[in-house]
Structures are given as structure tokens and as C-alpha cells.
Image (cartoon, rainbow, N blue to C red):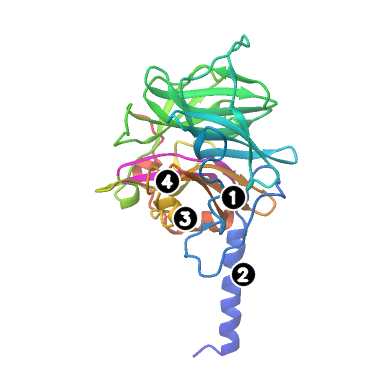
Amino acid sequence: MEMSDAAALFMNKKKKDQEDQIMSNVKIIGPDVPNVPWQDRPEGASNLPIWRYQENPIIGRNPLNGVARIFNSAVMPYGDGFIGVFRGEQTNGIPYIYLGRSKDAIHWDFEEDKIPFQDEDGKAFMPGYAYDPRLVKVEDTYYIIWCQDFYGASIGMAKTTDFQTFTRIENPFLPFNRNAVLFPRKVNGNFLMLSRPSDSGHTPFGDIFLSESPDMIFWGRHRHVMGKTDEWWQNLKIGGGAAPIETSEGWLLFYHGVTGTCNGYVYSIGGAILDLDQPSVVKYRCGTFLLTPEEWYEERGFVSNVTFPCATIHDAATGKIAIYYGCADTYVGLAFTTVDEVVSYIKEHNSVSTVDTEIGKR
């Protein structure tokens, strides 16, 4: 017996309501940020769950005196506005970290001087160079994590509670290491950090690892999280991006995947969901990229073909997520998604492997 048109419409509506209910069950666990920057998906956007801000890039060339380019930077809510740590490539080619503030997280005012790091005795303690910072709040402290020289490329860290005094803390790892990303809360009583062991050059390899610390001084219990795959956009190496977002499905991680071409590396943005209690276990991993260089500011610059995620601002009440990413080592771009859309997409295009789902210990 053929179904009537009315019955068919009812069944389709019921199915859609069920699908919407499934999607709406995904929740961001964290504070509400009602002033999260936002722009609705434009007409004609791709079927991918992330769409670009139509006025990109939000930071262009020569943003302040003596700095040629700002990119690969991290921002977060602070007070009634926003604050950020920015990779400023000086005109002499040496990168440092600069502080910026904004009322809307789109238009930024930068301090002219580099962030004045000091040691625990209050004496000036500046790294020789510093780049690709992340900014994460854990409990009542803000942590800045970056790449620097520690007799080879490695991780530098500092803490602040007021963005006036910035105190360096111990380097967490030996050289060579990059792309360190701190989790926004302790898990099982310990701080957690993702990192990507590397070499001292451009590193034609690299997997993401997880490490634990009880005190931000001693790090151990190292676990493998995930590595490169056969998918073209992440078949060379991968690395952590923005600080993981806690959701009801697990830790939502935006990371970068890299491939090699005859014209150099191409950096795309990928997505994965890690287990909440054992984040070295990957529950879902998207087989397709979420964003890849396509716009002029991503394809053309000091280093072409780079989309490099470093931060998100997200609102638990609405599920809105704003993603900040470096573009072609020259600009800062902004993109948007919702936790419903991106988690659903990652699960629908899941390509998690048996290695990904291991605890990461051998």
C-alpha cells in the first residue's frame, strides 16, 4: 500500500524532528559568552560545517610599528570584552608575542611593546624569540604557551592573573617540540597538554601526544593521541590547534593537518572528538578537512596555503563557536560554526582508526 502524501509529510517531519533532537543534545560545557562574535552562514556557502567571516582578514599587514605581520594568535573573553596574545613578526624577521584587547573580538588594539616576561624573582626573562602562542584559562590563572628556543625548538610557558605581570614557568619538554595546547581544566586532578614532537626545522613528520602534570613543573604519563592518515590533507603531519572545547560528546579539538606539494606545504583545519576522561582516546575523527586554503588571504602571503587554528571563543548557551586561525603566515582569519553542526559532521564523516582509539601507551 502506498503512503499518502499527508502521511509521508508527517513521517518526514517526524524524522527531521528526531534528527534535530539528536543534534540539539550536543552541549558545550563552559561559561556563557553572549557577546561571542558571530555572522550567520552566508548563502551559497559550502556544505562544510565551518564558514568564513565575510570581512576577513580581521588583521592585515603592518598592524603596529615595527611589526610586519600578525598571525597564528590566540584570543579569549576577558572582563566585558576580549584579550589576546598575538604572534607579531617584526620587520627584522624575529617573532615575539604582543598583547591585544578588543571590545568585539574583531577589531583589535595592540600594545606597542612585547609582553614583558619575567622570572619568579621578578627579573626580566625574555625568550630569544617566541611564536604561535596559545592562551588558556585554568581555574583562576591564564597560561600563555608558545614555541621558542630552548637549545632547540621547544615549548615556553608563562602565567598571569591580571595581564599586567607575566611570570615564566618551567619549560615542560625537552627539544624538539611544538604546537603545545593546554586543556582548559584538570582531568583526574592533573593538568593536561597536547604537543607535537618535532625537529629543529620544518619537520616533515609529527603526531599529537598527550602529557600530564600535577603541578605544571613535572610532566609525564605521555600518551599518543593520533597521527597522520592516508587522507591527502593530513598525510604528512598534524598538530594541535585551539584549546579543546569540553562538550557532552567529548573534547572537541580543532587541529591542523599538513600535506606536501611541489609548491610546499599546505595546512588545513581538521576536527576530532576526544574522550572526556581519557583524552588520548579518539572517539571520532573527521576524514575530510573542515577548512582548507581557498581564499586569497589563505593562499597568498609570506608562506602560502596556510589555515592554522589557534583559538576559539564559544558560547555554551547557544552553541556558537568562533574560530581564529592564521592565514598564510600573514593575516588572522575568523570562521564560524555551531557545536551541533561540527560535531554532527565529524561523526557523519568519522574515519577513526584502531590506532586512534588506543590508550596511546606501548
Between residues 159 and 139, which one lies in front from this camera angle?
A: 159
* Other-residue count near label 2 (Cα within 10 Å), few / some / many at <14 / 14–19 / ≥20: few
Would you name the residue on which mark 3 appears? 347
Tell me the mark number nearer the camera, choosing from 3 and 1: 1
Proximity of marks 3 and 4: CB atoms separated by less than 8 Å: no
Q: Amino acid at mark 3?
A: Lys
Would you name the residue on which mark 2 appears? 17
* Other-residue count near label 4 (Cα within 10 Å), few / some / many at <14 / 14–19 / ≥20: many
Q: What is the x, y in percent for residue 45?
A: 50, 66
Q: Amino acid at mark 2?
A: Asp
Q: Which mark is residue 271?
A: none
Q: What is the x, y in percent for residue 38?
A: 64, 55
Q: Is residue 344 left or right of residue 285?
A: right
Q: Amino acid at mark 4?
A: Ala
Bounds of the magenta segment: 236-259
Q: Amino acid at mark 1?
A: Ala
Instruction: Give the Cα distance between marks 2 and 1.
Output: 27 Å
